[in-house]
């Protein structure tokens, strides 16, 4: 076999990375990638697109919130997007206070829940930064074993991360509501996330089609990212092996 015929998925000749390196790379890539994508898809454009596709671009909100005398008032997509923009800025930490002008539309319990969501996102951002540091650390360790070993780390770690997210995505496709509730029970153990769709404006602003649409976008984008990273790692394996073969040939000729 000539150097140009080295298989794309060939194993590294200078040694494989340790298994825990690959596991750490996979977890770090999944955490940092999913958090980044969740924040990226929290924008106005995503909300509007899902609202139109999901049929809640025109809805009615109750005012004053939580009152037995509340009146349902039609709300346009522009008003919904404006409310989403205010809430997303708060929960993502871009503003320090919740949207006070929406006080007539949301109850005290809903405000408390959104404060909890803000706390979860703060922890998620910290986890994303820790994941990026872990990625840099483990790649640095692999580089000490050579380019092929680094390629194997990147390739195998990306495949593992993509397979994990794909499995979760397939589960969400067939059992979204149970997984959605499980997620909330894990991250909001205080249990203040259950609201009556008939009386909650927060549920009307963020109905199930919104969360389903966001989940599909985040999951699909991450799988595409993992595939790209895996291909990049495979190319590193090939380039490293070709380089080693070329170097060995030069030594032999001498």
Image (cartoon, rainbow, N blue to C red):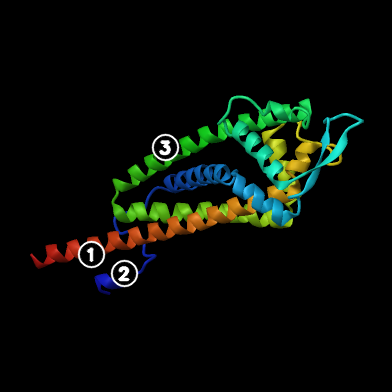
Q: How far, Cα to Cα, is label 3 from label 1?
A: 33 Å
**In terms of depth relative to the viewer, which is nearer, 248 or 93?**
93
The residue most toward the bottom is 1
Q: Quick one: label 2, few (<14), some, or many (20+) residues within 10 Å?
A: some
Q: Quick one: label 3, few (<14), some, or many (20+) residues within 10 Å?
A: some
* Image marks 2 and 1: residues in contact by CB distance under 8 Å: yes
The residue under the point 34% across, 59% down is 237
Q: Quadrant of residue 205?
A: top right
The residue under the point 83% across, 40% down is 73
**In terms of depth relative to the viewer, which is nearer, 73 or 241?**
73
Measured as percent of width and height from the top left, residue 8 is found at 37, 67
User: Which residue has dot 1 on it?
Assistant: 245
- Pick whichever of labels 3 and 2 is earlier in the sequence: 2
User: Which residue has dot 3 on it?
Assistant: 133
Q: Which mark is residue 39?
A: none
Q: Secondary structure at mark 1?
A: helix
Q: Quadrant of residue 90?
A: top right
**In terms of depth relative to the viewer, which is nearer, 210 or 252?**
210
User: Which residue has dot 2 on it?
Assistant: 6
- Let me know if residue 200 appears in the view: yes
- Let me know if residue 213 appears in the view: no
The residue most toward the left is 254
Q: Is residue 147 left or right of residue 95?
A: left
Q: Is residue 34 left or right of residue 157?
A: right
Q: How far, Cα to Cα, is label 2 from label 1?
A: 9 Å
* Image marks 3 and 2: residues in contact by CB distance under 8 Å: no
Measured as percent of width and height from the top left, residue 163 is found at 55, 56
The residue most toward the right is 68
Q: Quadrant of the N terminus?
A: bottom left
- Pick whichever of labels 3 and 1 is earlier in the sequence: 3
């Amino acid at each position: 076999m000539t150097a140009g015929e080295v298989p794309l998925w060939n194993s590294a000749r200078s040694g494989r990375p340790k298994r825990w390196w690959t596991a750490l790379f996979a977890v770090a890539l999944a955490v940092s990638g999913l958090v980044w994508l969740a924040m990226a898809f929290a924008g106005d454009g995503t909300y509007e697109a899902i609202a139109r596709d999901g049929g809640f671009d025109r809805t009615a909100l109750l005012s004053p919130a939580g009152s037995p005398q509340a009146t349902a008032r039609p709300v346009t997509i522009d008003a919904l997007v404006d409310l989403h923009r205010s809430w997303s800025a708060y929960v993502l930490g871009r503003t320090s206070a919740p949207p006070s002008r929406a006080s007539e539309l949301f109850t005290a319990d809903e405000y408390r829940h959104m404060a909890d969501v803000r706390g979860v996102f703060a922890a998620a951002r910290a986890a994303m930064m820790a994941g990026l540091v872990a990625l840099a650390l483990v790649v640095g360790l692999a580089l000490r074993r050579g380019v092929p070993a680094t390629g194997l780390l990147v390739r195998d770690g990306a495949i593992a991360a993509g397979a994990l997210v794909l499995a979760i995505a397939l589960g969400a496709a067939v059992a979204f509501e149970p997984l959605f509730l499980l997620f909330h029970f894990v991250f909001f153990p205080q249990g203040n996330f259950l609201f009556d769709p008939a009386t909650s404006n927060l549920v009307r602003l963020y109905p199930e089609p919104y969360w389903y649409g966001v989940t599909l976008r985040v999951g699909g984008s991450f799988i595409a990212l993992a595939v790209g990273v895996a291909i990049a790692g495979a190319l590193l394996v090939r380039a490293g092996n070709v380089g080693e073969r070329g170097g060995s040939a030069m030594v032999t000729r001498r």
